Amino acid sequence: MHDVDDQLRELLPRLRRFAASLTRDHSSADDLVQASLEKALSSWDRKRPEGDLRAWLFTILYRQFLDTQRRAQRYSRMLAFFTGSQYGQHTPSAERTIVAQTTLQAFESLSPEQRALLLAVSVEGLSYREVAHMLDVPIGTVMSRLSRARQALRLLSEGEISPPALRILK
């Protein structure tokens, strides 16, 4: 294990340099290296003994970077969806922020099925065909459900309807 420690210490500057070239920010690069090393150490038992340690660590770091980028893009799309801005490129006005908060509250009051449908199509960018396959329903059903979900969200955020009340069953 002492040999592995020495190898990791030797590779650390290279990993930092690679991470800095990806993130273009030294603190983000350090975070990326730390997260990658944590992942590598936690999955050490799955590493092939004959495999190249350097290649394995660089692969983990690169995949960790891609995962972080995807999460950031999803967050940006979600923010754009609720603020109406194009991927958060400008600071929203106070009015737009209030509208976004109202819309987000309205979104939370939708049924789980409607929320999932809106997120899949409007935020994640899945096609109607992909969503139809995911839900195992025809494309027309996806389109009509999505239309109803969008209409419900619009009406809820404008305060025109209240969420359906729960019925008490005896």
Image (cartoon, helix red, strand yellow):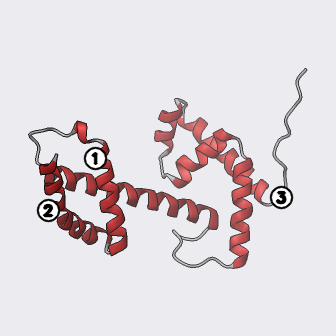
Residue 151 visible at all: no
**Image depth: mark 1 or mark 3 in front:** 1
State the mark number for residue 159: 3
Residue 155 at x, y percent in the picture: 78, 55
Vertical comparison of 41 with 21: above or below: above
Query: For this view, does 3 lie left or right of residue 81?
Result: left
Mark 2 residue element: helix
Question: Which quadrant of the figure has residue 78?
Answer: bottom right
Residue 42 visible at all: yes
Residue 157 at x, y percent in the picture: 76, 58
Q: Which residue is tagged 1?
A: 41
Q: Which residue is tagged 2?
A: 10
Marks 2,1: beta carbons within 8 A? no
Residue 161 at x, y percent in the picture: 84, 51
The residues bearing labels 2 and 1 have C-alpha atoms spaced at a distance of 16 Å
Picture quarter with the C terminus: top right
Residue 91 at x, y percent in the picture: 59, 79
Looking at marks 2 and 1 on the same chain, the residue that comes earlier in the sequence is marked by 2
Query: For this view, does 40 lie left or right of residue 31?
Result: left
Q: How many marks?
A: 3
| Residue lying at 29% horizontally and 54% vertically, measured from the top left | 37
